[in-house]
Amino acid sequence: EAQVTQNPRYLITVTGKKLTVTCSQNMNHEYMSWYRQDPGLGLRQIYYSMNVEVTDKGDVPEGYKVSRKEKRNFPLILESPSPNQTSLYFCASSLSQGQATNYGYTFGSGTRLTVV
Amino acid sequence: AQKVTQAQTEISVVEKEDVTLDCVYETRDTTYYLFWYKQPPSGELVFLIRRNSFDEQNEISGRYSWNFQKSTSSFNFTITASQVVDSAVYFCALSEAFAGANSKLTFGKGITLSVRP
């Protein structure tokens, strides 16, 4: 089954303790992206990746890191989490971007992160 | 810069009523894509529709219909004969086709729809 898998689904952590949210897709998609969802703000892009070893900042990258060492994986890293990073996070992938044809996006099931 | 406005924040209806969710967008591109997603209480994002800017035909899928009007930059979503299972947050989103490397989705803030029995 074609899907984007995020782990964990739920995570409660303490301020300053490094954590990684994993994202993996099995569709050979080139484009992957992370979004965070906050009440009253909708979803906002954190980082994106066009392909292996190609990543760039989205609209709200502060406090986050990403890597793309393999095509299928795009982990989101919080080196020193803070309470303002408490949010619902989504990973998304798409076949390719920057072209006239938009193939649509596949979203993971979300990771609900609480930083206390 | 692209922008999506969902002016309605919360809507409450009684089952079997029709309800329209409004979406207004801004973009400088002539080629772009519009989306609607549903987020039920379980939290996942459920894809409903994708429409490209060259296709202004309205679409109907069961009880769902979409009205795309470029003249008013709107992409409204109507649920006919609403049901309790329609209760969710609904997001409208925009993606520019030629945004270089990052054709990100720009989301509206979402509309919380509550359908009462």
Image (spheres, coloured by chain):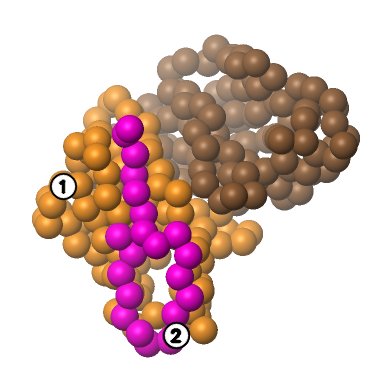
Q: Which residue is mark 2?
A: A14
Instruction: Tell me, by letter, which chain the rendering colours orange.
Output: A
Residue B91 at x, y percent in the picture: 58, 42
Q: Quadrant of residue B101?
A: top left
Residue at 55 percent of width and 12 percent of height: B57
Above or below, A102 against B43 in this view is above
Left or right of B27, for residue A97: left
Quadrant containing the C terminus of chain B is: top right
Asked if residue B32 is positioned above or below residue A50 in the image, the reply reads above
Return the x and y of residue A13 as percentages of the image width and height.
44, 80
Residue identifier under label 1 = A71
Query: Is residue B100 visible from the viewing direction of this image?
Result: no
Residue A65 is situated, as x and y percent measured from the top left of the image, at 26, 69
Q: Amino acid at mark 1?
A: Lys
**Residue B90, above or below A48:** above
Give A26 or A93, whichever is nearer the viewer: A26
The segment highlighted magenta reads: A1-22
Say which of A12 and B63 sits in front: A12
Q: Is residue B61 magenta?
A: no
Q: Residues within 10 Å of mark 1 (few under 14, many from 20)?
A: many
Which type of secondary structure does the marked residue at label 2 adopt?
Answer: loop
- Farthest residue in the front direction? A1
Distance between the alpha carbons at the discs numbered 2 and 1: 31 Å
Q: Chain of mark 1?
A: A
Q: Amino acid at mark 2?
A: Val
Q: Residue at x 21, y 53 (%)?
A: A73
